[in-house]
Structures are given as C-alpha cells and as structure tokens.
Image (cartoon, rainbow, N blue to C red):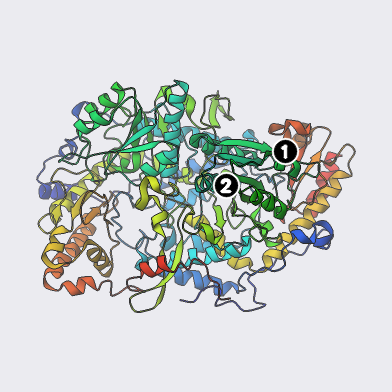
Amino acid sequence: MDYVPNTLQDQQQMMKAIGIEALEALFVDIPEKYRLKKLLEIPPPMSEQEIWEHMTRIAARNVTPRSTLLGAGVYHHYIPAVVHHIIARSEFYTAYTPYQAEISQGILQAIYEYQTMITRLTGTQVANASMYDGATAMAEAAVLSAKTLGKNRLLLARSIHPEYRAVVKTYAWANGYDCVEIPCAASGQIDSGALKDQLDDRTAAVLVQSPNFFGIVEDVKPLADLAHGRGALLVAGFTDATSLGILKPAGEAGADFVVGEGQSFGNPMNYGGPYLGILASTDAFLRKIPGRLAGATVDREGCRGYVLTLQTREQHIRREKATSNICSNEALCMLAAAVYLASLGKNLKKLATLNVWKANYFRAKLAALPGWKPLFPGPVYNEFALACPDVKSANSRLESAGYTGGYDLSREYPELGGGILLCATEMLRKEDMDNIAALLK
Amino acid sequence: MELLFENSRPGRKAGTIPASDVPEVALDKVIDTSLLRTDLNLPELSEVDIVRHYTRLSQRNFGVDMGFYPLGSCTMKYNPKINENVAGLQGFTSLHPYVPEAAAQGNLQLLHELAGFLSEICGMADFTLQPAAGAHGELTGVMVIKKHFEKKREKRTTILIPDTAHGTNPASVALCGFQVATLRSNTEGGVDLAHLRELMTPDVAGLMLTNPNTLGLFERNIDEVASIVHGKGGLLYCDGANANALIGVTRPGDLGFDIIQLNLHKTFSTPHGCGGPGSGPVGVKSHLVPFLPVPRVVKEGERFRWSDKFPDSIGRIRSFYGNFNVMVKAYTYIRSIGAEGLRRVSENAVLNANYIKERLRPYYQLAYDRVCMHECVFSGEKQVQESGVHTTDIAKRLLDYGFHPPTIYFPLIVREAIMIEPTETESKETLDEFCAAMISIAKEAKENPDLVKSAPLTTPVKRMDDVLAARKPDVCWTLC
C-alpha cells in the first residue's frame, strides 16, 4: 500500500519548480553522516488484502470470551448501534481540534451538549471536553488542588482503583507532593476516623471513589464536610459511569471535582483504550480546570454558535503557566459518550437499576456457595468483592467454561487475605449466573 | 441549530432496556435513599431525532476527507480506511484489559512489534506505548529525565526550551516540577549556540528540542547542540511532533537525542478525531530504558506477558496500557507501507512543502529563506503593511475557497505567522489549487481588503465573538 499520490512526473515538475535535481537536495541541512543509506529494517509493504489477512490473524490469536465477569475499572455494556454510525462519520473522525470555529460548529456544539449532560450527571457547573482517562482526570484534579491551595499533601482512599492511585502517585512524585493512603472500614467504605486523623493543614485534597474499587457506594457528603473543615478539597471519582444514572451526584454532595472513566458511555473495552476521562467541577474552577471547554457565543450577525473558550488556561497561550499540559484529548470517545447519553436519555436510570439487580442476584447466588461470602456489607452498584476458598482455581474453572474470571484482589490488597472482585452488568444473563454458580460449587 | 435539549419531548425514547431476568428489588431496599439521586435531567429523543441531529452537526464540520487541511505541525495526512476496518475487528475491540495474558497474545505481539518498529525508525533502544497523547508523552519523557538525575543524586532544576517550541513543552516541564529557561533562536531559525552555552549550567537537566523545529527547519548544528548539552551532563529530548519529515531519512537516536516522543496521530496516520484520541509513545536510549513506565511487554520464547518488575520505573502514567486501539491503526499503517513507504512519506512531505514555499514566495513574505522540511512558514506582515489585512483574515478567507487554513500566529517568533504543512498524501493538483487560492487572496488583500476582512462569507456561521464567550462564559445549557 502507498498513500502518496505524487507520480515520478509530478515529482520532476515540482523539483524543477524548486530548482533542484534530486530529492536528496531537500535534505542538505541533515549532516551527511546521519542520512540513512539504506532502508529501515521494517518488513516490506503489503497490499490491502494482505494486510487485512495479516491483521485478522493477529486478532485471532486473542481469545474472545463468551462473557466477562471482570469490571475493575472497565465495563462491558451494550452499545446502541447509532453510536458507531455517528462516530464513524469522517467529518468527525478526520477533523482536528476545532480551532477554526466557522467550520467546526458540529463538534463544538456536540462538546457543549456533552458538557451539559456531564454537569447534570455529576451535579456540577462545569465539565471539560475530556481528559485521557479516569486515572489522569483524577491525577490532574489532585495536582490542580495542590497548586490552587499551595499545599502538598494528598489523602487517597485505598479503595480507589489501584491503577488510579499509581497514576496519582506518579504525578505527585513529579511535583514533590506526599501521598497518604486511607484504609477501608469494615463496611468497605473509607475509614472516616482514619481520614480525620490524617487531615491536616498541609492537605490539599481528599480523593475517594464511589462506587469504589470494591463496588461499594460511598457516602460523599460527610467526607466533603471533613475535607472542607480542614481547608482541603474533595476529589470524588467513580468507577462505572452508568452508576451516575441512579446515584446522588457527588457535586451535590459537596465534591469540588468529580472525575472518572467515561468508557461505559458507548466505548468498547478495546484492551484498555482509548477511553475518556470525565472531569467536572464547580464554578469556582471555571477559569482553572484543565482541558478544552466549548462555550456558546454569537457570530457577527448575532447567530448562536460555539467556540473553544477560556483558552488562557491552556498551554498554547500560557505555556509554563498553563493549568495543565494537555493538548489532544479524547474527543471522538467523548462524542461516543454524548451520542450514548442522548440515546439512553432517562433510560440510563433503568439501565443502572438493572445493573444493581443483576449484581445483587449474582452476589446472593455466589454467597450461598460453601466458603463464599461478601467481603464487605456496604451497598453495591454492579460490582462486589467476595471471599472464596481459592480464587485461582475458581478463575481457571470459569476460563475453561469460556468466561473471563474475576479480578484477584490478592494482586493489590494483601491485607484482605484473598478475595475476588466480580461484576454483573446488563450483559450477564441470569442463565450465565446460574451456570457459573453451579460451576463453582 | 437546535440543541439536543431543545428537541427533547417528555416520553420520547430511542431504544429500550431489556426486561430484567432477575428479581426486581426496590432500589432503596439495597442502597440508602440518601445515596440515590432524585431526578435525572437527560434529553428524551427518538432514534431518528438523534441520527439527524448528529448528521446535521457532522455537515457543519470539516475533516481531511472533505478537503486539504494544511495545518502546520499537526500533520493532517489522509487516514487510511483499512486502518479503521482493522481496528474494528472484534478480536481487538472486545477484550477487557485484565484478561489473562494467554487470551491476549495477539494484542501483546502487536504491541511488542510496534515498539520494535518505532525503535528502529527512531534509532532508540526501546519504546513505551502507554502515553495517551503527544503532550502526555512529553510529560513521560520529562519524568524519565527527572528519574535519571534522581538516581544519580544530582539536583537539576531547569529544562531549556527554544522560543519556537510548542506550548506543550514548557507546560509539560512545569507539570513535572521543573523550571523553564527559554533558549533563543539564531538569525537562521536554529538554536543560538552562544545562548545555549550560556544557559547550559550544571543545574540544567536537559534541552527539549523539536527537530525539525516549528519553523519547519532542520537543526543544522545538531552535532554542536548535542555535544554542548551532553558535555554538561544534560539529556537531549526530541519532541517528535514533526517526525513526518524524518522517517526513513535519518534517525533522532543517531542525531544524539536520548529521548523522543512520537505522535501516532500525526506521523503514523491515525485520525485526529476532532482532537483525540491520539497516542504519544516515548522512545529512549538504553541507559534510560529502566525508567520507562510499567507495565511493559516482555517476550519469552514465542509467548508475551506483562511485567512490572522494573524497580527504577517512573511508575504508571495512565491506566492499563495506553490507547491500544490507536496503536492497532499505527501498526497497520507501518506494515501496509513498509520500509520503502516510510521513506517515501518523508521525501514527499518535504517535497510538497518546498513546492508550496516556492510557489507562494512571490506573494507572501518568507520567515526564513532556507530549504524547509515538512512545513513552510510565511509571515503575513507584508499584507498588514500594504492593506491592513491580517493573517487571521487570510485564514478566514481560505474557508471561502474550501480549504482548511494553515496554523496561524505560531511559532510565536514570526509575526503574523502562516505555517503550512501539506503532508505527503496530497497531489500536485491539490497543492496547485491551494496555491492559486492563496495567490488570489493576496490579490484580494490589495484590491479589496474589506472583502478579506469580512470573510468567511460562505460558512454556516460567520466570525464568532470570542471575547463575549470568555467574558460571559456559557459552558453548559441551563434553560431546560
């Protein structure tokens, strides 16, 4: 394959116009000794048919399960057909960031509508046009909290997704901030006594996630009150974004930032990405939040339209004084999320409720097996942690039957003494759950 | 155009949720009422409403598939269709990132091979694919620099950045706790070596250099630059945003760079998606490999697995493994065009840029009169002086001719800058049509400046009031 239209004749005409005789003359500024004399050691080109066959073979080396019991930050949801049809329109997917507003009204309006839906779902006043993923959204909210308050200590609930904590710690290390982890109480929710003990005047932010990594719903309000009482900010994350359809918005409960992974809104699991980081906040951070914002305005003739706005927050204007270094975001994933939300509308509540029912049924079913019991009594959304006799053998039995097993909690939580994290979305049928319970008996 | 919310009608629905096959319980029986929301204000639309809404929006958007998009430093090349089809294969899209490694051997093989190809293309020892975008790659690269000096127990606080650099460079450095010192350009658009010698003190961790730089010029003195930076124990970072000029022609690793970030959404043909997703892999020389993010793919015999047993790693900078599906497209592209194709990319990207430069030089002032690489930079200063027409007017007038404008007002050191990057995927006819439009606008600027200043005249909306948008921010709909 080759995507270069220039023919030899074109090249010759162009070289003549430039006044050179060989292409080599274009590279005179590169010291001669550094110019490659031979081709790179990359395999030779393929025809379109050959590359299709080659890539199909690679994809076939993966094993697609009949169903997955994994959640742990990435969720298997049904994606309405309209989502792909819209994001596959090349007016959207082959465009750049909408700096030229007059020919980018399509995506600008879509961003504005997305921002509106996210503020409504999170109980906030401002949402940006997406971050890279849930983890970087959380890390940037933490860094912004520290910079805004001039403080250097972050308190993280241990029940936050382990990879999110790892990313926050990397960003904190780079900026010289301390991170302290706050353990869980017996309920599976954050230990608010331990949090209270750790809160001090150096604390910039308290970071929690609800539902948390164990699927447990946190009570955000008292945590926000505790943080604010010591002059710190509250960063509230979430795991599965569909939970926003029924849970009280963290913004209403007093969170200063609401952050999380938007993958559940219309984006396939894609082995980890691309996804979209949701980042929303209160009016107080309107002129500080990282990332792109679409704003409504009018054109010269007074017609309503949209532009990228408050760009003085951003790196291309403010350089080292910018709020963040983010430039590319996850716009097309955001568009998928917007179409998904438009498509579900108020049905999002129904979907989220179905997830709760499935998880409660599955949890009860498994908890009835000998040696299996819930690790925490707290309320769950669509994920739950169970103690079980042998996680590895349970997972290998599930895999032999074509299921992807659960998340082995001993990987990151040795203090729990073993356990498995399982997820039941609307994609898991009762028949599967019953089969699985029989299989694990 | 109406908003989704304005078209919403109570009771209207698109699609349905399946009936429950498990017992239904009242929500407040399992989750305390105080933790539940009381209302859900999302729009209510039918499926056809949604499809027409977004289809109409798409008609108010301009992509590469609609026409020439010579946005400088953004490399808006054609996005091959086969890449999209391949990336949509169920084997790639349907995998959860935590599936056992045995179930993801195809993905792991692809990631391992892609890192190998990028290493070969750049002359680096290894690559991480975890960064989600170019700026994220920069941040990762700067973290690698930080870790390198932390291990050596050297306290270095500053990173040098040329005055031509993208804004992401200083912003990435600041987000990693370093100070920025700005390095001047010389009269030929390259690094001012005397200034570099002066700035390169023992507390400087390194230099972030875009090569070719944002003037589209290759750093001729790269040997001296590298030796000054390395001579003081610093590291040389290459912002690979402009790698489309170099692939198959020269290798940043051979030029003396220690670290590079690539933008798969520029050089390797993955679509920009209205601003993302991108992918910003980072390559390093062997002495920096231990600091790359975890986890990394390890090959054992014919099997691949993830490993996080790299104690000196900077840690994680994103969840999971990065923008995997973008990498599938970049891999497909590299395998499609092969070694010969990679070289043809840069040769033709540079040829096209020089052709535009020569065609337009009689009409617009060239910022630096040298052979350019993949992009050329003009100044609109001549038009400002002659008729008060500014670069922004020229850009807006190009919309009326059916072209996406070049990058404007960047780099900052060129007044009224017009930065044109044609890429290799455009034909001579397209370049000629674009040049004809630019020449015609230069003429209009002289003869009828008001026409140019009132552009665009043919777009769905006219020039937008940015000042109003910033003064009275309206970033979400609150009326219903």
Element at badge 1? loop
Q: Nearer the viewer, residue A328 or B187?
A: B187
Q: CA distance from mark 1 to mark 2?
A: 19 Å
Q: Nearer the viewer, residue A227 or B240?
A: A227
**What amino acid is labelled 1 in the image?**
Pro
In the picture, measured across the screen, residue A139 lies left or right of residue A218, that is left
Whether residue B208 is situated above or below residue B380 in the rendered picture: above
Residue A159 falls in image quadrant? top right
Mark found first going from the N terminus, 1 or 2: 2
Q: Position of residue A294 (x, y in %)?
A: 45, 63
Residue located 40% across and 58% down the image: A311
Q: Chain letter for mark 1, please.
A: A
The quadrant in which the C terminus of chain B is found is bottom right
- Callouts 1 and 2 on one subunit: yes
In the picture, measured across the screen, residue B396 lies left or right of residue B107, that is left
Q: Position of residue B293 (x, y in %)?
A: 51, 32
Whether residue B290 is situated above or below residue A123 in the rendered picture: above
- Give neighbour class at mark 1: few <14, some 14-19, many 20+ (Cα, 10 Å): some
- Give neighbour class at mark 2: few <14, some 14-19, many 20+ (Cα, 10 Å): many
Element at badge 2? helix
Residue A97 seen by the camera: no
Q: How many marks overall? A: 2
The quadrant in which the N terminus of chain B is found is bottom left
User: Which numbered marker is on residue B480?
Assistant: none
Q: Position of residue A245 (x, y in %)?
A: 68, 62
Residue B125 falls in image quadrant? top left
User: Circle 1 sits on which residue?
Assistant: A183
Whether residue A51 is situated above or below residue A253 in the rendered picture: above
Q: Position of residue B370 (x, y in %)?
A: 14, 43
Residue B260 seen by the camera: yes
User: Which numbered marker is on residue A138?
Assistant: 2
